[in-house]
Amino acid sequence: MKSTSALLKTMGAVMALGVAFGAPVAAQNDFSNVEIRAEHVGGNVHVLFGAGGNIGALTTEDGVVLIDDQFAPLTDRILKAVEALESGPVKFLLNTHWHGDHTGGNENLGKAGVVIVAHDNVYKRLSEPQRFENARRNTEARPKEALPVLSFNDEVALHLGEEARAYHVAHAHTDGDSFIHFTESNVIHMGDLLFVDRYPFIDIGSGGNLHGVITGIKQALALADADTAFIGGHGPLADRSKVERYLKVLEVARDRVAALREDGQSLEQVIAAKPMSDYDDAWGSGFINPEAFLRAVYQSLETAHH
C-alpha cells in the first residue's frame, strides 16, 4: 500500500494532467499502479483517494451517492472499493464541477445506469467543446452517457438514507461549482473550492473567480459546526480550523493584491513584489505555485462577477 504522501503526490501529478486536458485522461497515461484507498470521514460518509479529485461516498442500505469519479480507467477499482464498504448499489453521482479529473468516470457510470446530477453549467461545459485557456488546448464535447441527466440552478437535495444537499457557488473555482452537505453525517464535500493547506487553482477561463471561492467557503462554514469534517477536492481531510485558515489566506491575498493594484501596479509588478512571501513556502508548494496564484487573484480583481 502506498503511503499517504505518495498517494497525494500521485493525485497531484495526475490532477495536473486532468486539469490540463479538461477531458478525462485516457490510455496514454498509466493508471496501473493507482490504488483506491477508502477512509471513513463521519456517519455514513467515506472518502476515496486515488488519482484526481477526492471522491465522496454516502453509503446506505438504499444505495450509494458518489461525489465525483476521477478517471475512466479507475472506474472498476472505484466500484470495488465502494462494494467493500458493504452498501447498496451506486445510484447517484454528483459532479462538483466539470474538470476531467472529477468527471472522467462519468461515461462508465452513466452506461451502468447511475443517475448523474450536476449544476447547469457543468452540463453545458461537458456537452460542448471547451477552450481550456490554462493549457491552451481545446476539449471535445463528452458523449451523452457522460452528461448529467438532472441539472440544477441553485441547490438540489438527494434523499437516500440521509440528505445530501448540493449548493451551487457562482463564479468560484469555475462557473459550475457545488459543494455537498451530508447533513446527518456532518460532512461537507467542497470539491475544488477547497485545496487543503495549498493555494487553490482558480480556472478563470471557465468563469472562476477568487471572490466566489471566498463566498463559497463562508457559505459552507455557516452550515458547519465545530465538529464538521471537510473533504477538499484534493489533499487530506480537513477540520473547521483548517478551512478557516484557508479562508484567511485567500482574504489576505485578495486584500494585498488589491492594495497594490489600486496603487497602479501591473500584474507583472505585483508578481515581482511577492506580496504573499510570508505564506509562499507553506502554501505555494502544491499544484499552484505563488506566481500562478497571484495571477489568478489579480485577474479576479479585474472581473466583475462579484
Image (spheres, rainbow, N blue to C red):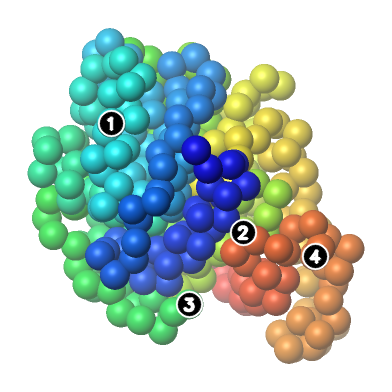
Residue type (three-letter) at the residue carrying disc 4: Asp
The location of residue 235, given as percent across then percent down, is: 58, 46
Tell us which disc is closer to us: 1 or 2.
1
Query: Pointer 3 and pointer 4: residues touching (CB < 8 Å)?
Result: no
Instruction: Using a 10 Å C-alpha cutoff, classify the residue at mark 4 as few (fewer than 14 neighbours), some (14 to 19) or many (20 or more).
Output: some
Q: Earlier in the sequence, mark 3 or mark 2?
A: 3
Q: Quickly name the residue at label 4.
A: 280
Residue 220 visible in the displayed image:
no
Q: Between label 3 and label 1, give the one nearer the viewer.
A: 1
Q: Identify which residue, 151 or 62, lies in the foreground.
A: 62
Label 2 near label 3: C-beta < 8 Å?
no
Amino acid marked by disc 1 = Lys
Mark 2: amino acid: Pro
Disc number for residue 134:
3
**Label 4 to label 1: alpha-carbon separation:** 39 Å
Picture quadrant of residue 29: bottom left
- Picture quarter containing residue 228? top right
Which numbered disc, 3 or 1, marks the residue that appears first in the sequence? 1
Q: Is residue 134 left or right of residue 236?
A: left
Quadrant of the rendering where the C terminus is positioned: bottom right
Against 268, residue 112 (above or below) is above
Q: Read off the residue under disc 1.
A: 80
User: What residue is pinned by disc 2?
Assistant: 200
Q: Quote the CA–CA distance across marks 2 and 4.
A: 12 Å
Residue found farthest to the right:
278
